[in-house]
Image (cartoon, rainbow, N blue to C red):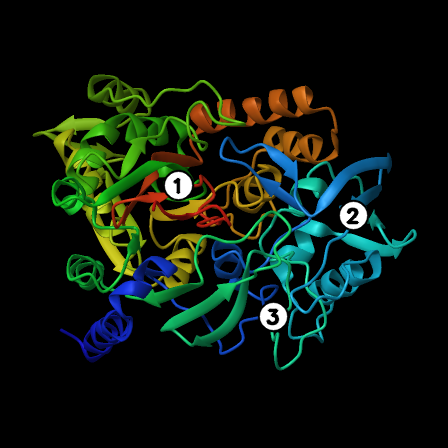
Amino acid sequence: MSFLTRMTAVALIALGTAMPAAAQDATLTISVTFGPTAEVPDPRAGYNGWMSNQTGVTETLMGVDYDLNLYPRLAESIEQSAPTTWRVTLRDGLTFHDGSPVTAQAVIDAIAPISDEADPAFNKRIAGVLDLAGMSADGDRVVVFETNSPNAAFQWSLSDPGVAILGAPSDAFPINATGPYIFREAVPEQSYRVEANADYRLGKPGFDEVRVVASPDPATASLAFEAGDVDMVINYPETDFARIQETGAQGFTAPTARLYFYSMNTTSGPLANPLIRQAVSLAIDRDGIVEAVLSGVGGVPAGTIYPADKSWAADIAPSYDPARAEALLAEAGAVKQGGTWTLDGEPLEIEILTYSSRAALPPTAEITQAFLQQIGITASVRVGEYGASNDALKAGDGDMFLQAWVMLPQGDPGSILGFLLASDGGSNAGNYVNPAMDALLVEGQTTFEQAERERIYDEVQQIIAADVPLIPVFHVSQAVVARAGLTGYQVHPTETYWITHETRFAE
């Protein structure tokens, strides 16, 4: 056991033993994989907004529901008054944790730093999605947003946890937000603590206090749960999920928008040929991977990039057809000799890249390697850091890059698809270039009628299935366990919502 793991275990035990039994139902202690990044993690910077949103500290103007639909949150309504103009009307009577009113100017003051490179709250990712030309207040309750170009995804971008609406900070309220819980303290990489906001507009929260503790080792988190030191574990080990429920624990699982997928090197090596990319996709038994890696409970085989039966998902089923895969290899000019495929007289070899910060990645890559070898493709796996693997594929050093992304962090497909698949996309590691795809992505960004946008993104998914710049493998079904009696909780498909004011232990 590493020093960090030992210290995490000590911290978990200390949290458990410090609370008297009578106080247990008033406090919820959650074990998660990653801790906060600072003593006061600004929700607008990096991905800090995820934890502040998950713990009920911060709220956004818009939200995404459990079916991945958009809804007004702090906003009462949103309307588009011109191609680049959006008017957001705030709910009446909103207040920050310090009691000050949430006004249109306060919203502007909260969002403006996101696009200011000189401000600590600057967030390049979110600034690019918002694409703001300016903001102005029309009275106390209406914020007028001007974008640089027509952007149909703009209203969805207001649901990003990083677009948190904050008031002026103080010593008493260093993160002065609007949610059912008030930020109290954080220990970088270790813990995050919040207390109930008794004046929350929708009702008194179910806990006096919520504590989040970081445990990078899933085994340590599961031991702490069984010892009663934590009440809830997010991303509980799938291999133990069935057994722990037999002890009386409560289990929650549902598919999320986090997709495990391969980016393909489309410009060099064997996968520059789309027929070989198709063959590789057909050679992968996604059901087998989910069963082997995730014990059949931690994932759902993916035919496309969004969870089936959720918003934006095209009707494309995962397909496993080794015979068809071999036929495509032959059509691509490969020759099978002695049970092994060759291409242009050389062994057809594919190198799979991935990283280890998510436990399911290396075994998924290794099982993929086995499936490819079953049909005679020589394959190898190289595990490194995320950035190094991404850079290697971008440079043509490798053929497939296995990674895991939440594909709908704001509930809208436009930004992520642009990052991954546009010719100039910032995360297009496979260097995929397709003018038809580029045109569709621009059309999706500038089309405002919802049914038409769904048609556009359905066509995008059909191109992905046919041209295979990406191979969807599975959607993570987040596994969560809690002490018996927890109510008002369910797994959210974006992973950015954990508890609401209604989450509590039944009396």
Residue position for label 1: 491
Using residue 366 as the reference point, say whether residue 458 is left or right of it: right
In the figure, is residue 27 to the left or right of 146? Answer: left
The amino acid pointed to by label 3 is Ile
Query: On the image, numbered disc 2 is attached to which residue?
Result: 92
Q: Give the percent coordinates (x, y) of residue 397.
A: 36, 55
85 to the left or right of 7: right
Q: Are marks 1 and 2 in contact (CB under 8 Å)?
A: no
The residue sitting at 54% across, 36% down in the picture is: 65
Q: Say which of 415 and 188 sits in front.
A: 188
**Mark 3 — residue?**
175
* Camera-side residue of 7 and 426: 7
* Residue 265 position (above or below residue 68): below
Identify the image quadrant of the N terminus.
bottom left
Give the CA distance from mark 1 to mark 2. 30 Å
The tag earlier along the polypeptide, 3 or 1, is 3
Q: Amino acid at mark 2?
A: Asp
- What's the amino acid at mark 1? Val
Front in this rendered view, residue 427 or 454? 454
> Looking at the image, is 172 positioned above or below residue 388?
below
Foreground: disc 1 or disc 2: 2
Q: Is residue 191 visible?
A: yes
Q: Quadrant of residue 472?
A: top left
Task: Please provide percent x and percent y for residue 178.
Answer: 64, 58
Counting residues from the start of the chain, the first of labels 3 and 2 encountered is 2
In this view, the residue farthest toward the left is: 338
- Horizontal relation, residue 69 to residue 492: left or right: right
Q: Nearer the viewer, mark 3 or mark 2?
A: 2
Q: Secondary structure at mark 1?
A: loop
Q: CA distance from mark 3 to mark 1?
A: 26 Å
Residue 488's quadrant in the figure?
A: top left
Asked which secondary structure carries label 3, the reply is: loop
